Image: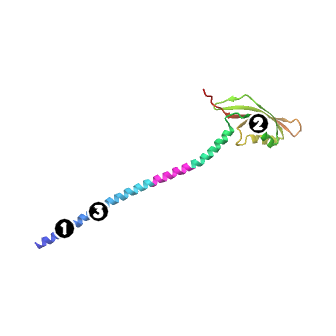
Amino acid sequence: MAGKSRESKNVMPVLAGAALLVLLVFLLNVQVKAYRNARAALERERAACRQAQMMLADLKEAEKQAGLLAEKLAKYQKMMPGEPEQNTLIAELNACAAESGVNLQQISFGSRLAKEGYTEMPLELVLEGRYHDLLAFLEDIQRDGRRAVRLDSIKMSQGREEQTLVRADVAASVFYISKKKTS
């Protein structure tokens, strides 16, 4: 009997040890699953962070481009204003002629042609000057940032005064944005 009692005394600690071992395995399994879930959540957060950083970079780039687009819009609005601005156009043509060394003898405007969203304003110029100066004038009036000008025709002939002067009859058109009529 003493052997049974001794065996039962030995069984209790073994059972307690086995129960403790099962409990530890269970807790370890729970911790491993929690660790995996935390790593998956961390990876999702990192992916979301990378995506947010890419969006931020795109927004910063768009912000940079917004300034450039605003500058371009202002330039194009100057090239095609909302009104005919004939006086401004005449002043610009006179300034270009003076800068180029060309004598702008006459400016005449033709009948305006209403198009979809804009109006075309034909004009004729009579110029006199040296050939290269006339070319410089024609380049200057079409320079980027000035009024939008389309050269339709250029007739060149001998100038009135000297053999070296050339007369140019230029048919061109400028444009402006048509204002919508309100009813």
Position of the N terminus by quadrant: bottom left
Q: Is residue 82 above or below residue 28?
A: above
Question: Cβ–Cβ below 8 Å for labels 3 and 2?
Answer: no
Residue 140 location in percent, x, y? 75, 42
Mark 3 to mark 1: distance in Å? 20 Å
Q: Nearer the viewer, residue 25 or 66?
A: 66
Query: In the rendered structure, which amino acid carries the disc numbered 1?
Result: Met
Question: Looking at the image, which residue sits at the far top?
Answer: 183
Relative to 10, say whether 74 is above or below. above
- Taking depth in this image into account, of 154 and 43 the one nearest to the observer is 43
Which disc, if any, is residue 25? Answer: 3
| Circle 3 SS class | helix
- The residue identified by callout 1 is 12
- Crowding around mark 3 (Cα neighbors within 10 Å: few <14, some 14 to 19, many 20+) is few
Seen as rendered, the residue at the extreme bottom is 2
**Residue highlighted by disc 2:** 90
Residue at image point 23% right, 64% down: 19
Residue under the point 27% across and 62% down: 23
In front: label 2 or label 1: 2
Query: Mark 2 belongs to which amino acid?
Result: Ile
Q: Where's residue 12, x and y in %?
A: 19, 67
**Residue at the spot x=61%, y=46% of the render?**
67
Residue 49 point in image, percent of width and height: 47, 53
Query: Which secondary structure, mark 1?
Result: helix
